Image: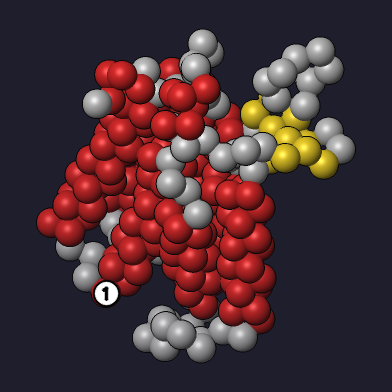
């Protein structure tokens, strides 16, 4: 049975800057996939892109383990990866149960208004809301900033050792995308995904400053709590309006 170090040797080609690129693209998908879908002929409900948030979030946590290994003990990084798999499954189950943010069937006009659902717009085969446009715009701006930072290393985290400038890009990108998800998402589940990305960026940053076991455990517990709270609030929001009073 291969050990952690055997797996790291096999994934050596992905470590460093390639891992950062994969993590940031996946994080952008996890943030930007909400409130946008594909119109289907003969149906009033569009095919949502929001389910893409699950595989994207799973990729973020799996590949970010290769970044956490650069600042933490490999065994602690594995704990983060396992925690990320659990969180991604929580998002998957909650998203499936809440129809990925789509209004539940059978709501009256008054109930729909009470839930404050944004009015969708159409552009060709795409159906989206103003929130989706804002979220995608912020995500693209953060990716552009991360690209600029990658081309001008050692401009922010000056204490990084030589050859580790890609960690600076990872912290900035994940933190920025997480904040974009929180700011542009009044819904609990996509906002929770954004907050989880921000906490992952903070975990990566704090691992450079103080890679203590106590802080690692505290951040793991905090992210699990955030995932569970976001799942609960998302479930509560899908209840009939008369039950929310």
Q: Position of residue 164 (x, y in %)?
A: 48, 75
Horizontal side of 101 relative to 46 (left or right) equals left
Q: Quadrant of residue 24?
A: bottom right
The answer to whether any part of residue 19 appears in the image is: no
Label 1 sits on a secondary structure element that is helix
Horizontal side of 81 relative to 105 (left or right) equals left
Which part of the image, by quadrant, shows the C terminus? top left
Q: How is the image coloured?
A: secondary structure
Q: Position of residue 116 (x, y in %)?
A: 47, 37
Q: Quadrant of residue 19?
A: bottom right
Using the image as rendered, state which of residue 17 and residue 180 is in the foreground. Answer: 180
Q: Residue at x 43, y 41 (%)?
A: 187
Against 242, residue 182 (above or below) is: below
The answer to whether any part of residue 195 appears in the image is: yes
Tell how many labels: 1
Question: Which residue was labeled with disc 1?
Answer: 209
Q: Residue at x 33, y 50 (%)?
A: 77
Q: Quadrant of residue 48?
A: top right
Q: Residue at x 27, y 19 (%)?
A: 243
Furthest-left residue in this view: 214
Using the image as rendered, state which of residue 84 and residue 12 is in the foreground. Answer: 84
Q: Position of residue 147 (x, y in %)?
A: 65, 72
Mark 1 surroundings: few (<14), some (14-19) or many (≥20) residues within 10 A: few
Horizontal side of 113 relative to 138 (left or right) equals left
Which part of the image, by quadrant, shows the N terminus? top left
Furthest-right residue in this view: 124
Q: Residue at x 20, y 44 (%)?
A: 221
């Amino acid at each position: 049975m291969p050990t952690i170090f055997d797996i790291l040797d096999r994934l050596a080609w992905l470590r460093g800057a390639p891992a950062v690129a994969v993590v940031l693209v996946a994080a952008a998908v996890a943030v930007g996939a909400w409130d946008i879908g594909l119109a289907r002929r003969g149906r009033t409900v569009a095919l949502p892109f929001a389910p893409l948030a699950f595989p994207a979030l799973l990729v973020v946590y799996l590949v970010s383990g290769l970044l956490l290994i650069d600042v933490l003990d490999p065994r602690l990084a594995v704990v983060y990866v396992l925690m990320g798999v659990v969180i991604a499954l929580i998002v998957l189950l909650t998203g499936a149960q809440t129809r990925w943010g789509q209004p539940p069937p059978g709501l009256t006009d008054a109930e729909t208004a009470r839930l404050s659902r944004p009015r969708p717009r159409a552009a060709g085969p795409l159906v989206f809301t103003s929130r989706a446009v804002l979220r995608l715009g912020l995500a693209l701006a953060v990716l552009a900033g991360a690209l600029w930072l990658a081309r001008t290393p050692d401009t922010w985290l000056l204490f990084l050792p030589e050859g580790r400038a890609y960690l600076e890009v990872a912290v900035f990108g994940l933190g920025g995308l997480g904040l974009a998800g929180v700011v542009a998402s009044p819904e609990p589940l996509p906002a929770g995904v954004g907050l989880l990305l921000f906490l992952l960026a903070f975990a990566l940053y704090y691992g450079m400053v103080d890679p203590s076991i106590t802080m690692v455990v505290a951040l793991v517990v905090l992210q699990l709590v955030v995932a569970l709270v976001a799942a609960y609030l998302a479930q509560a929001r899908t209840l009939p309006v008369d039950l929310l009073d």
